[in-house]
Image (cartoon, grey):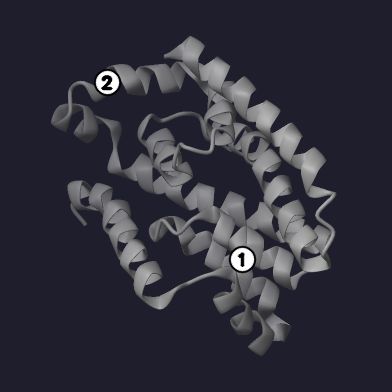
Amino acid sequence: MNKRYLVLLPFIGAICAYFFMATEGISPQSLRPILVKWQRYAPIIFLTMHTIRPLTFLPTSLLVLLASLYFDFFTGLILNLTGLILGMTLAYFLGNYSGREWLVKKYPKSKDILTKIQSGGWPLIASIRLFPLVPVDILSYTSGVCNIPFISYITGSILGSLPSLLFIMTLGAGVRGGDFIVIIPSGLLFTLLIIWAWKKLKKVY
């Protein structure tokens, strides 16, 4: 496949995902019956959903909440973390295959941005992951394009994703169990981490 078309693949997926969600009303509740029906293979099905999710640009929170509605907290946490790693790995190598050279040649102004991301290493990746307004899949593809070392990328991605993962799962568990008190401390901690990430990103850019 021509590399320029490979670069466009995620954006086409994003458009398809938007229209699919708008017309089908996809939600954690609508996906839960799939796991219930195939209960024996639920963990495998869930991990598969997570792995291919970056190709569709469906929000990560969709599957994180799904896990909190179906699995117990710790099982859901392990499956979500494993699924996130698989999905982030797929997106990274797709970006890596598409190549930095083509992107810089097509969009020369992107060179400075790519250099900043590359020099920031895993702390910058973690900070961007923490900030909820940055699309996580765009970061994954960009990290691959920038040829950021995979270990640095995945380390920063895991550390940056954990706070939001824990917060969303706590939120889901609170809704599921009717205990909303547990949401408050995790929400405050997550807010403080977002503020810290924002300050760090402002220093870089």
- Residue 104, percent from left and from top: 21, 27
Q: Earlier in the sequence, mark 1 or mark 2?
A: 1
174 relative to 118, above or below? below
Instruction: Tell me if 106 is positioned left or right of 171 in this view.
Output: left
The three-letter code of the residue at mark 1 reads Leu
Q: On residue 47, which mark appears? A: 1
Whether 152 is drawn above or below 137: the answer is above
Residue in the image at 69% along x and 35% along y: 190
In space, the residues marked 1 and 2 are separated at their CA atoms by 35 Å
At 68% across and 85% down in the image, what residue appears? 36
Badge 1 local density, few (<14 within 10 Å), some, or many (20+)?
many
Front residue (pair 154, 67): 67
Q: Is residue 151 placed above or below 90 in the rendered structure?
A: above
Instruction: Categorize mark 2 by other alpha carbons within 10 Å: few (<14), some (14-19), many (20+).
Output: some
Horizontal and vertical percent position of residue 72: 82, 66
Identify which residue is drawn at 55% across, 35% down.
129
Q: How many marks?
A: 2
Task: Give the numbered dot on residue 111.
Answer: 2
User: Measured from the top left, where is residue 7 in percent x and y?
Assistant: 26, 47
Quadrant showing the C terminus = top left
Q: Is residue 106 left or right of residue 119?
A: left
Q: Nearer the viewer, residue 119 or 135?
A: 135
Closest to the observer, 144 or 76: 76
Label 1: which secondary element: helix
Mark 2 lies on a secondary structure that is helix
Given the image, on which type of amino acid does mark 2 rest? Answer: Lys
**Measured from the top left, where is residue 53 in percent x and y?**
47, 60
Identity of the residue drawn at 53% across and 70% down: 27
In the picture, the quarter occupied by the N terminus is: bottom left
In the rendered view, would you say 15 is above or below 117?
A: below
Q: Which mark is residue 114?
A: none
